[in-house]
Amino acid sequence: MDVDAGDRVEFVQIEAGRSELIAATRAVRDLKGRFGKPECAVWIDEMNAAVAEEAARAH
């Protein structure tokens, strides 16, 4: 897992009754540029609606 004393770790719930321990050693800013440039801009209201829609499907 490549963690040392003092590194941050997080528990992430995968599903009910199942969690994983992951290293949280990098800043979010380190992700910049890793996923390519988006095809178009998305308004926050559109993103919130998409997240709500997917959450409703999951339950």
Image (cartoon, helix red, strand yellow):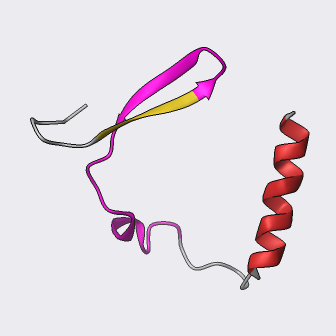
Q: Which residues are the magenta region? A: 14-35
- Residue 46 coordinates in the image, percent (x, y): 83, 74
The tally of labels here is 0
Residue at point 84% right, 55% down? 52
- Which quadrant of the figure has residue 27? bottom left
Is 53 drawn above or below residue 58 in the view shown?
below
Side of 43 where 11 appears, left or right: left
Is 39 drawn above or below residue 28 in the view shown?
below
Taking the view exactly as shown, the residue that stands out farthest to the top is 17
Residue at point 84% right, 36% down? 58
Is 2 drawn above or below residue 16 in the view shown?
below
Side of 42 where 1 appears, left or right: left
Q: Quadrant of the N terminus?
A: top left
Taking the magenta stretch, the answer to whether it contains residue 33 is yes
- Residue 6 coordinates in the image, percent (x, y): 12, 41
Taking the magenta stretch, the answer to whether it contains residue 27 is yes
Residue at point 86% right, 65% down? 49
- Residue 38 coordinates in the image, percent (x, y): 64, 78
Q: Quadrant of the C terminus?
A: top right
- Which quadrant of the figure has residue 23? top left
Residue at point 42% right, 73% down? 32
- Which quadrant of the figure has residue 3? top left
- Residue 39 coordinates in the image, percent (x, y): 71, 81
